[in-house]
Image: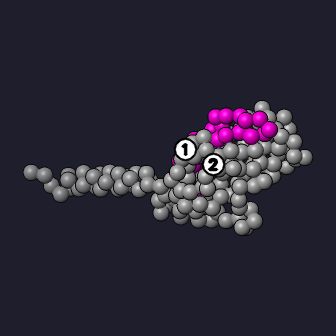
């Protein structure tokens, strides 16, 4: 015969496992409520800080402009062309661009790993695999390692 005291720990273990499974399932959705709460302190920049550029890098070494093949919308995979110049407007070719980003208020990154697949000359590069999995404020960061040094341009996008 099994006493209450023997069964009880098993029940609580099951309850914990169930809670973990539920938490994991919620975490797999585009953006959980917990994530939104975690990043709720991130301050949305002024409207003037939004857009496709031209946008100056953090240390002023480069100026970058985004040109999506179609207007950016949530849940669409697409290619975004970025044009890079130095601070005097001279095209920067041969740079290594690394893409990063996410939603500061939700505490999650990009759902894909966009990367440069074509260099077009005149400072233009095509970034493939750009996708935003929900609407809202996104940061889209382009780290540039080129002839003027290393710097990063942060675009604020509203989808
Ligand atoms: Cu989000």
Q: Secondary structure at mark 1?
A: loop
Query: In the rendering, at what x and y percent does residue 84 appear?
Result: 78, 43
Tell me the residue that label 1 is attached to. 112
Answer whether residue 118 is magenta in the image: yes
Range of residues picked out in magenta: 103-127
Q: Is residue 121 visible?
A: yes
Check mark 1 vs ligand 1: CB closer than 8 Å? yes or no: no
Question: In the rendered view, does 7 fall on the left or right side of 158?
Answer: left
Q: Which residue lies under the disc numbered 2? A: 69
Side of 100 where 22 appears, left or right: left
User: Element type at marker 2?
Assistant: loop
**Residue in view at x 55 percent, y 52 percent:** 132
Crowding near the residue tagged with mark 1, few <14, some 14–19, many ≥20 C-alpha atoms within 10 Å: some
Relative height, residue 88 to residue 122 (above, below): below
Say which of 15 and 65 sits in front.
65
Q: Earlier in the sequence, mark 1 or mark 2?
A: 2
């Amino acid at each position: 015969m099994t006493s209450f005291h023997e069964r009880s720990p098993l029940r609580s273990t099951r309850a914990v496992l169930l809670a973990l499974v539920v938490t994991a399932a919620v975490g797999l959705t585009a953006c959980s409520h917990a994530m939104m709460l975690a990043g709720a302190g991130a301050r949305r920049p002024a409207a003037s800080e939004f857009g496709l550029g031209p946008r100056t890098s953090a240390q002023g070494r480069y100026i970058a402009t985004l040109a999506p093949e179609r207007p950016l919308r949530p849940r669409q995979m697409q290619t975004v062309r970025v044009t890079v110049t130095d601070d005097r407007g001279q095209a920067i070719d041969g740079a290594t661009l690394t893409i990063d980003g996410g939603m500061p208020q939700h505490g999650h990154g990009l759902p894909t790993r966009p990367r440069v697949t074509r260099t077009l000359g005149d400072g233009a590069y095509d970034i493939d695999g750009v996708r935003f999995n929900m609407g809202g404020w996104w940061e889209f960061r382009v780290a540039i390692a080129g002839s003027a040094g290393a710097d990063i341009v942060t675009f604020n996008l509203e989808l």
